[in-house]
Amino acid sequence: MAGHFELIDAVGGDCQVRLVDAEGTELALSMPFHDKDSAAKGIYSLREIAASGLVEDHTASAN
């Protein structure tokens, strides 16, 4: 499945990062960043975490 990151305008002149899948469905929306450089750093961090991060279940039905 191919997807991509999008930089989009946020309230107050900030920008956000949106992660979408191949069909264009939004999978994640970031916090607001003050500028595009900060958003790019957020994307880099997300890629690093996604490559090696563990999944933690914090739902009410977790055993």
Image (cartoon, helix red, strand yellow):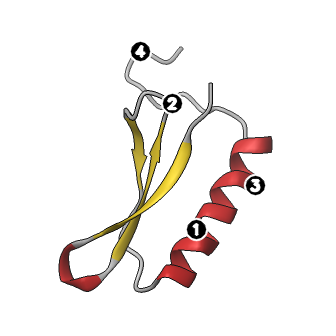
Q: Which residue is mark 1?
A: 42
Q: How would you rate the neighbour count of disc 1 (Cα within 10 Å): few for under 14, some for 14-19, many for 20 or more?
A: some
Residue at disc 1, secondary structure? helix
Q: Earlier in the sequence, mark 3 or mark 1?
A: 1
Q: Which mark is residue 48?
A: 3
Q: Where the C terminus falls, by quadrant?
A: top right
**Which mark lies nearer to you, 4 or 2?**
2
Q: Amino acid at mark 1?
A: Gly
Q: State the CA–CA distance, disc 4 to disc 1.
A: 30 Å
Q: Which one is earlier in the sequence, the residue at label 4 or at label 2?
A: 2
State which quadrant residue 11 falls in.
bottom left
Q: Secondary structure at mark 2?
A: loop
| Quadrant housing the N terminus | top right
Q: Which residue is mark 2?
A: 22
Q: Where is residue 38, by image quadrant?
A: bottom right
Q: Earlier in the sequence, mark 3 or mark 4?
A: 3
Residue under circle 4?
Answer: 61
> Separation of disc 1 and disc 2 at Cα?
21 Å
Which residue is drawn at the image coordinates 56% and 38% (left, top)? 3
For the residue labelled by badge 4, is the local secondary structure a helix, a strand or a loop? loop
- Provide residue 4's location: percent of width, then percent of height: 55, 46
- Give the CA separation, mark 2 to mark 3: 21 Å
Judge left or right: residue 42 versus residue 14. right
> Which of the marked residues, 4 or 1, is nearer the chain's N terminus?
1
